[in-house]
Image (tube, rainbow, N blue to C red):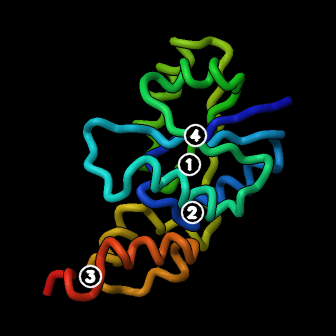
Amino acid sequence: MRIAIYAGSFDPITRGHEDLVSRSLEFVDKLVVAVATNVSKQPLFTAGERVELIRAAVNNNARVEVRQFRGLLVDFAREVGAKVLIRGLRAVSDFEYEYQMALMNRHLSAGLETVFMVPSLDTTYISASLVREVARFGGEIGDLVHPAVAAALRQKYPPQSRPA
């Protein structure tokens, strides 16, 4: 079985993330969407909330497992039996960091490969941070995220709490 990991903070999952999930399933048997705990970030959603939103966004696809993880991604990959890491590149500016991470992961686990994927043209501009910003100020996010995510964002940013 070909198992890959798509790791990130997914705060929240966007249509761009969903695009990479569905396209990854074209060449792997199972995809583990790994919700990272990044100590340098203050997430809007808890890890548990992010897991549930991802499950909703991927429609509980049996080939997609959603899990939280802490620590090194290479250790988590060993735990789930993954040989491939999926990484999205929206812009050239993403490449330097992602390349460095791929080399470090290969150094730590020689059999672990990183596959870089570019998003579809209609999702290239979408990032979780931009989605949060648009939601915070009451903008329309319906085409940027799954309906369950849009509803969760509206709960986090109800109209009366939005900045003027």
The reply to whether dot 2 and dot 1 touch (C-beta < 8 Å) is: yes
| Residue 116 visible within the image | no
Q: Is residue 12 left or right of residue 120?
A: left
State which tag comes first along the sequence, 4 or 2.
2
Instruction: Give the structural element (helix, strand or loop) at label 4.
Output: strand
Mark 1 lies on residue = 88
Mark 2 lies on residue = 16
Residue at (36%, 75%) from the top-left corner? 155
Amino acid, disc 1: Gly
Locate residue 48, reporting x and y percent. 46, 49
Q: Which mark is residue 127?
A: none
Q: Is residue 35 left or right of residue 61?
A: left
Q: Which mark is residue 67?
A: 4
Amino acid, disc 4: Arg
Mark 2 and mark 1: span between their CA atoms? Answer: 9 Å
Query: In which quarter of the view is residue 61 placed?
Result: bottom right
Instruction: Give the structural element (helix, strand or loop) at label 3.
Output: loop
The reply to whether dot 3 and dot 4 touch (C-beta < 8 Å) is: no
Eye-nearest disc, 4 or 2: 4
State which tag comes first along the sequence, 1 or 4.
4
Locate residue 12, reporting x and y percent. 45, 60
Locate residue 159, reporting x and y percent. 27, 87
Mark 3 lies on residue = 137
The reply to whether dot 4 and dot 2 touch (C-beta < 8 Å) is: no
State which tag comes first along the sequence, 3 or 2.
2
Amino acid, disc 3: Phe
Mark 3 and mark 2: span between their CA atoms? Answer: 21 Å
Amino acid, disc 2: Gly
